[in-house]
Image: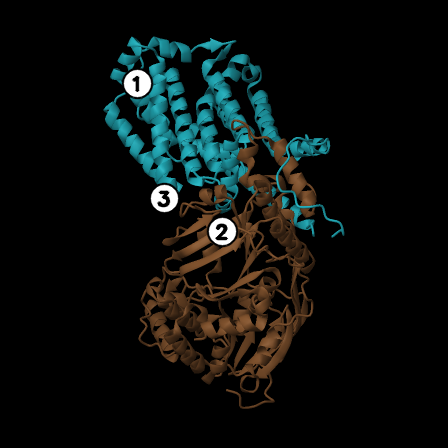
Chain colours: A brown, B cyan
Amino acid sequence: MLEDEQQRPLLEVRGISKRFAAVQALKGVDLDVRAGEVHCVMGQNGAGKSTLIKTLSGVHQPDEGEIFWEGEKVELHSPTAALDLGIATMYQELDVVDGLTVAENIFLGHERATRGVLHVKQANATARTLLERLGHGSLSPSREVGSLSAANKQIVSMARALSRDTKLIIMDEPSAILDAGEVENLFRVVRELTAQGIAVVYISHRLEEIRQIGDRISVIKDGRSTANGLHVTETPKAELIRLMTGREVANVFPERTPVPADAPVVLDVDGLELEGHFEKLSFTVRAGEILGFAGLVGSQRSEIMETIYGARKATSGRVSVNGKALTPGSVTAAVDAGIGLSPEERKSQGLILDEPIYRNVSLSTFERFAKAGLLDERAERQAAREQIDALELRPADPDRPARTLSGGNQQKILLARWLVHGTSVLLLDEPTRGVDVGARAEIYTLIRRLAAAGTAIVVISSEIEEVLGLADNVLVIDDGNVLTQTTASDIDEHGVLDLVMKGSAA
Amino acid sequence: MSEQKTPVAEKPSVQTPAPSASGGSAVQRLFHGSAARSVGLVIALAAIFAIGIVTTGDRFLSGDNMLVILRHASIIGVISIGVTFVITAGGIDLSVGSVMGLTTVVASLASVQMAASQSSWLLMVVVALAVGALAGLINGVIIAYGNVVAFIATLAMLVGARGLAEIVSGRRTLLVTNTDFTGVLRADVLGIPVLVWIFALVAAAGWFLLNRTTFGRRTVAIGGNLEASRLAGIKVKRHLVALYVLAGVTAAIAGLMMMGRTTSGTSTHGLLYELDAIAIVVVGGTLLAGGRGTIVGTILGVLIFSTLTNVFTQNNMDTSVQALIKGAIIVLAVLLQQRFAVRKERKAKAKPVRA
């Protein structure tokens, strides 16, 4: 733990910046981590935590800034370079190989062998020692990892870090996949590690957890450090929330047009349930209304959207559009009834990247343009061109492959697709992910205008500010449960975070 | 961002024809599209021709020899057209050779030929097509609705159909005695064998189907991004079934052509044709991962392989050496394709377009 305040930091990061094509992910982040401490890094979704982790683990190289390791300037060219220094990373998606044994996973990439022949017994024995150091001597080194729980897989991942003579372990939301009892156990292991002088960078947005395990806290927001090395015990919760929110570049949200009191209910979700994900979900969206889903990653928001859309088959419950119930589990039924989905993963779920803009726009309607099965590409191009003009999609060339467009323009393709189709309900899952600030305002204006034209819209966003700024009404959800339903003007970012953090505190 | 914004268009209006602006890009499309990729194949074909002319002179260029090349290309060519569709959609069909063998056996059964002699030789055609379509249907249903990987499902059909063909034929070669049938398939029209005409027709129909119809668009879309296609409302499963049926039908057509050429039906017809077809399709420029398919490329691929075989044979080259060289050519062609794909990607990355 912290004994010497003047101690030289193990890892020091000064002013690192990282830019991806259209997005400035990090714009000057500082961090100093001392040996034997648990250093928590907090920030909202999209604040740049993942990019920071990947920079420290050698996956990304920073455009600017310096990294010092034990006082010496270093460059982390590759994950191996980071591992060789003694920096190990435990990702949320655990990087264990299910088909291999515990010991094989621990020594993955640095197998105990002489001229290619594995020393199985020696590896198993060393693995057992490592597991004992983590307080898990009961875990058999020869057991297949696929049969372990998520919590035990984490232990294997940590043992692997130890096997490499690691001095710093980065844990990316390790508690996200654990239940309360397992979190207690995780904390015990983390304390074992720090007692042995190993530093832990602990990423989480659960305040209660951080109070229990953390020594110091750093906060990043919009890719910038807003606090560095605050003492956990001396920093009140309200101060942390303030540091995580209240951005400098305020997004400009378009004026709301009040939903007419007599606007008909267009989308009616009644007692919808998807086993293992969410239960008894009911809500309605009226014509011209924007309903926002606020919640953190893992709150099952996307699963809810996909179930409404029929991409997942509901266990029970009913979805109706304009009073007509949809066939569960049928995307075609949803599309025919007038629902359009702009999926969370734009590139892998929304677009055919190597196909031109116009074919992506007409993906839901090319059959309608066709006559007797013969494509009418001229009509498709014309329809795409009209949308390109209306949405100011750039470049304004219908034949440009979707791959070459920026995130904002790719999002516009998806909006254009459903505009051409003509939908009465639009489900927008993270419509501004990977979209830069300027283009965001455009997307917001478009969404607002669609609502004004009478479309019922559901918006999901990890950015609470966006949900509150854009939506008329808000559902705050966590882990598939609706925590509250309210008009957007009656709740602020603090309020939402407060609810969610209470709800998910271990 | 400009200040003014036109209102969001709500419904497509189709009245206005595309302005001439698309004329320029149409030419560009021709040069940047599959035609450009085919240029390399044309050059390769020309090179093989040159080797043929240099090594065997006029004998190679004679009209008769050209027809030999085309006739040799026709049967595998028809199968390759079907396989092009499946691969474009991101699938694979290993069973086409076996299914082809099975169709020849069933259509040559004594009972079928008897019935055909009493009605029409077309009955044999209908029986063969039905067998091919049924095999494809089974493949498609297992893949699309049983969620079995296409490689495994069609591998099972490869083994199973061959076995069934052996059972049905009793491991004997069945002679095709229906002279109406063989007469039609062995005839020449305008000096060109009917087999070649059939290939030309299937290829033309395939090109049209892939490039000009909703069926083709669905095929490319599913191969390009199955999940996006599904979420856009395309009935992906149904289409996958249709694709494997299509591949089965082309295998049946190839089977009929083989029966015409050899006047026999046997379980060994079409042995290893699935591998030849895949090699041809991939060399032709269709992406094995799906999302891009070219019928023109497949036709050129077939011609390259059959011309190559012809040149080898004319020069009395050992068949083992022929196989070795063909293997090397497949690897070379795919390596070149990948380099092309990488360059294209770099180009696209080099000029990112911002909002």
Nearer-the-camera pick, A37 or A123:
A37
Q: Which residue is mark 2?
A: A267
Q: Chain of mark 1?
A: B
Q: Amino acid at mark 3?
A: Val
Which numbered tag is attached to residue B148? 3
Count every numbered label the image shows and give the total.
Answer: 3
Residue A311 visible? The answer is no
Looking at the image, is A388 positioned above or below residue A317?
above
Viewer-proximal residue, B192 or A345? A345
Q: Quadrant of residue B165?
A: top left
**Against A78, is A189 above or below?**
below
At a point 41% along the width and 11% down the height, the residue shown is B184
Cα–Cα gap, marks 1 and 3:
32 Å
Mark 1 vs mark 3, foreground winner is: 3
Q: Nearer the viewer, mark 3 or mark 2?
A: 2
Q: Quadrant of residue B244?
A: top left
Asked if the residue under mark 2 is in contact with the one under mark 3, i.e. CB atoms within 8 Å, the reply is: no
Q: Give amino acid for label 1.
A: Ser
